[in-house]
Image (cartoon, grey):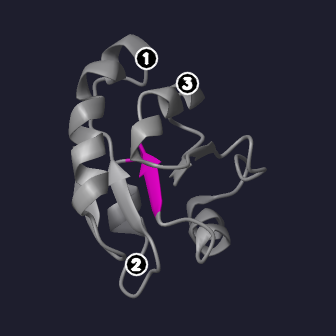
Amino acid sequence: MLLDACVPARLRHELAHVGTIESARFAGLSKLSNGALLAAISGRYDALVTADKSMRFEQNMDGRSFAVVVIVSVDNDLAQLQPIMPAVAAALATIRPGDVIEV
């Protein structure tokens, strides 16, 4: 699973029980545009966790080999996001390739 560059990398600790998680920065993918990022993670990751609410409208997710969980929050502050991590983990447990779920 990959945490998008717009999500605090420290959130990977909140989701460690779900599976192996890398940050986009650690994976060397933090500077890619959305389209290039989605192409780069295909076949490498089973899910992308992002806070980019426009991604589902700008990118075609049909036939993708991974799922996307979009975190809907007022901002990307760690303290603001931590309380919704159980819902993100639940979404990751049920999501299938090509799905986009907002939490």
Few, some or many residues within 10 Å of mark 3 (<14, 14–19, 20+): few
Relative side of 12 to 23, left or right = left
Q: Is 18 contained in the magenta span?
A: no
Identity, as a three-letter code, of the amino acid under mark 3: Arg
Residue 60 is tagged as 2
Q: Which residues are magenta?
A: 47-52
Report the number of discs.
Answer: 3
Q: Which residue is mark 1?
A: 77
Q: Earlier in the sequence, mark 3 or mark 1?
A: 3
Task: Say which residue label 3 marks.
Answer: 10
Residue pictured at 53% horizontal, 37% vertical: 6
Q: Residue at x 40, y 88 (%)?
A: 63
The answer to which quarter of the image holds residue 89 is top left
Q: Is residue 40 above or below residue 84?
A: below
Mark 1 residue type: Asp
> What predominant SS class does the magenta segment belong to?
strand
Q: Is residue 71 above or below residue 40?
A: above
Residue 58: image location, x then y, percent: 41, 67
Q: Position of residue 93 (x, y in %)?
A: 27, 56
Q: Residue at x 70, y 46 (%)?
A: 30
**Given this view, does label 2 or label 3 mark the residue nearer the observer?**
3
> Badge 1 local density, few (<14 within 10 Å), some, or many (20+)?
few
Kindly identify which numbered label has been placed on residue 67: none
Spot occupied by residue 77 in the image (x, y as percentages of width and height): 43, 17
What residue is rendered at 36% in x and 75% in y? Answer: 97
